[in-house]
Image (tube, grey):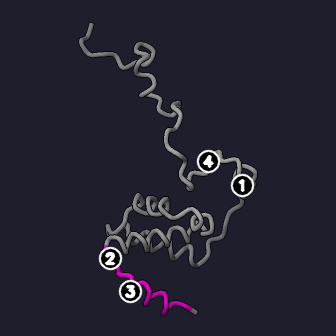
Amino acid sequence: MSDQPSLQPSLQPSLQPSLQPSLQPSLQPRSHHDMGGVPKFLCEPIDTADHTLTDFDREVDAIRQILGAKGVMSVDELRRGIEAIPEADYLRLTYYQRWIRSIADNLLASGVITEDELRTALAEAAP
């Protein structure tokens, strides 16, 4: 017999809870971006039709891809930035608006752009 302990959950029930964390009740409150199973959102039908991307959507996606290819910002940073958006803003913004908000926040936080540069660019782009 081996001196190595067996990791089979059925042979060591004391390991089962740590091997199956999804069975443990969550000790932390749900974050506002985690909508799975929330009754408020279960009543809304899911639109499964193909969606046409707008020019804005394509441009935001292209910006994210360029930033990733240049090593300026990762997909994980994008996700963390989206999850950090305050709940009221998160629920109000569209999918790609959340992306551009996260991109801007990440670029500001990392010093790639300054607030003044962002304000100037936004003013120049305003209709």
> For numbered disc 1, what is the local secondary structure?
loop
Give the labeled residue for mark 4: 36
Q: Quadrant of the C terminus?
A: bottom right
Position of residue 30 measured from the top left corner of the image (x, y, whole percent): 55, 48
Which of 55 and 73 lies nearest the eye of the viewer? 73
Work out how far the residue at label 2 is from the one at label 4, CA to CA, in angstroms: 34 Å
Residue 45 figure quarter: bottom right
Question: Disc 4, disc 1: CB below 8 Å?
Answer: no
In the drawing, what numbered circle is on residue 46? 1
Which of 46 and 52 lies nearest the eye of the viewer? 46
Mark toward the viewer: 1 or 2:
2
- Crowding at dot 3, Cα within 10 Å, few <14 / some 14-19 / many 20+, comes out as few
Position of residue 12 measured from the top left corner of the image (x, y, whole percent): 40, 15
Mark 1 or mark 3: name the one nearer the start of the chain.
1
The reply, left or right, for residue 102 in relation to residue 69 is right
> For numbered disc 4, what is the local secondary structure?
loop
Relative to 42, say whether 70 is above or below.
Answer: below
Give the labeled residue for mark 3: 117
Work out how far the residue at label 1 is from the one at label 3, CA to CA, in angstroms: 39 Å
Mark 4 or mark 1: name the one nearer the start of the chain.
4
Amino acid carrying label 4: it is Gly
- Name the residue: 37% across, 66% down: 68
